Image (cartoon, grey):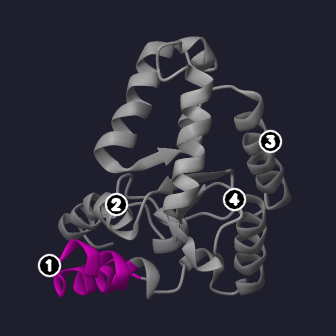
């Protein structure tokens, strides 16, 4: 989708949820324009692994839009990341429980030793969970259960390496949380200079 079309569509909707629906659920993803089978395969694998509905999986970021609303760069196959949103309250709770177990309710930051600043990583994850109802796979601590999820995502990323530099997943508690998060991207796009 062109930046101009995205800007025009975003202006038609003032409601955060309607914007999210229209721009992320109703528009096809840019990176899959000629490769719909790859999109289907990735979504099926995610759906099966995380035991979630196929329809709960959405593509976001430059792989969906064709450009980055934050960096102002175009999607480039093999260089750009694939940002995936999984919108499922039960799955969000399962991931939350894994985090709570690994961190002993955020009282033990040793599970965040995979980050340069464990305390900061722990706080950022807590903030995203509580303020945005979002958990990023890239911000998860170390634990046997979470490491299985991380290994699955790494294998999936390697399988589609020629299309995406990496695959990251954001788990959302509901569609409103997803749409609210995307609203900042939409606001950036509305003020971007069109190429």
Label 2 secondary element: helix
- Residue drawn where x is 73% and y is 41% of the image: 150
> Which marked residue is nearer to the observer: mark 4 or mark 2?
2
> Which marked residue is nearer to the observer: mark 4 or mark 3?
3
Q: Is residue 67 left or right of residue 51?
A: left
Question: Could you tell me how far apart the alpha carbons at marks 3 and 2 are, in whole angstroms?
Answer: 26 Å
- Residue drawn where x is 29% and y is 82% of the image: 4
- Please give the residue where the numbered disc 1 appears in the rendered image: 14
Q: Position of residue 18 (x, y in %)?
A: 27, 81
Q: Position of residue 54 (x, y in %)?
A: 65, 77
The question of residue 14 being in magenta is answered with: yes
Q: Where is residue 27 in the image (x, y as percent from the top left)?
A: 45, 87
Q: Main secondary structure of the magenta part?
A: helix
- Please give the residue where the numbered disc 2 appears in the rendered image: 177
Tell me whether circle 4 and circle 2 mark residues in contact (CB < 8 Å). no
- Please give the residue where the numbered disc 4 appears in the rendered image: 164
Tell me whether circle 4 and circle 1 mark residues in contact (CB < 8 Å). no
The earlier-in-sequence mark between 4 and 3 is: 3
Label 4 secondary element: loop
Front residue of 108 and 137: 108
**Quarter occupied by residue 128:** top left
Question: Could you tell me how far apart the alpha carbons at marks 3 and 1 are, in whole angstroms?
Answer: 39 Å
Question: Could you tell me how far apart the alpha carbons at marks 4 and 3 are, in whole angstroms?
Answer: 17 Å
Q: In this view, does 100 lie above or below 43?
A: above
- Please give the residue where the numbered disc 3 appears in the rendered image: 151
């Amino acid at each position: 989708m062109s930046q101009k079309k995205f800007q025009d569509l975003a202006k038609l909707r003032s409601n955060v949820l309607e914007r999210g629906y229209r721009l992320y659920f109703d528009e096809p993803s840019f990176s899959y324009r000629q490769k719909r089978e790859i999109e289907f395969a990735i979504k099926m694998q995610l759906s099966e692994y995380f035991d979630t509905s196929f329809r709960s999986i959405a593509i976001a970021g430059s792989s969906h839009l064709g450009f980055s609303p934050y960096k102002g760069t175009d999607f480039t196959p093999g260089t750009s990341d694939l940002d995936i949103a999984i919108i499922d309250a039960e799955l969000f709770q399962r991931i939350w429980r894994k985090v709570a177990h690994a961190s002993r309710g955020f009282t033990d930051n040793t599970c965040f030793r995979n980050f340069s600043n464990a305390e900061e990583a722990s706080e950022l994850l807590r903030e995203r969970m509580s303020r945005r109802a979002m958990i990023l796979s890239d911000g998860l601590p170390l634990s046997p259960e979470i490491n299985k999820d991380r290994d699955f995502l790494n294998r999936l990323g390697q399988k589609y390496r020629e299309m995406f530099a990496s695959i990251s997943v954001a788990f959302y508690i509901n569609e409103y949380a997803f749409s609210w998060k995307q609203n900042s991207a939409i606001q950036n796009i509305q003020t971007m200079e069109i190429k």
